[in-house]
Amino acid sequence: MNPGKLDRRLEILEFKRTVDEEGFPTDEWVPTRKIWASRETLSGRAYFEASAAQSEVSEQFTVRYGNKLTDDEKRVRCGGEAFVVEAFLPDPMGDRSESHILVKVVSE
């Protein structure tokens, strides 16, 4: 793995129940940590369903092998865009050099 290709700052998000200024509980995606990653678009497809335009774009983030996601970390943010985690592949090459996070774009 070439660490110079990890040129994106990826923010890992966790869904938590927090309390706002007025004391009311709110559910929100809270950043837990930041890691370096590279970004690659895998496919893009646009389709019409139920007379509404929808789009689906699959992306892959490559991170260092030691960076793992917990079960609660189901979203990531990169450059202002939010993504839902579809799969986490901890060691796809079998050499303990990198892990892959497969995501889809989600609107916040």
Image (tube, rainbow, N blue to C red):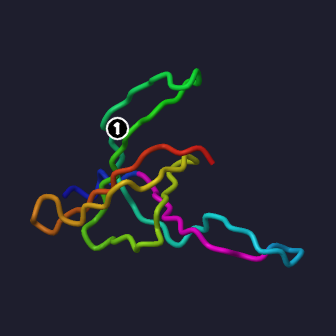
Q: Is residue 20 above or below residue 63?
A: below
Q: Amino acid at mark 1?
A: Thr
- Which region is colored magenta? 8-19
Q: Is residue 19 left or right of residue 95?
A: right
> x, y (%) of residue 11?
50, 61
Residue 16 on the magenta segment: yes
Q: Relative to residue 107, is residue 97 depicted above or below?
A: below
Q: Is residue 44 left or right of residue 106?
A: left
Furthest residue to the left? 94
Q: Residue at x 38, y 51 (%)?
A: 7
Q: Position of residue 99 (x, y in %)?
A: 25, 62
Residue 69 rendering spot, x and y as whole percentages? 38, 70
Residue 29 occupies quadrant: bottom right
What's the magenta bit mostly, secondary-structure-wise? Answer: strand
Query: Quick one: SS at disc 1?
Result: strand
Task: Name the residue: 55% across, 25% down.
Answer: 50
Q: Residue at the spot x=53%, y=65% of the render? A: 13
The residue lying at 42 percent from left, 65 percent from top is 35
Image: 41 above or below 31: above
Residue in front for this viewpoint, 21 or 33 = 21
What residue did someone put label 1 on? Answer: 41
- Of the 4 image quadrants, the one containing the N terminus is bottom left
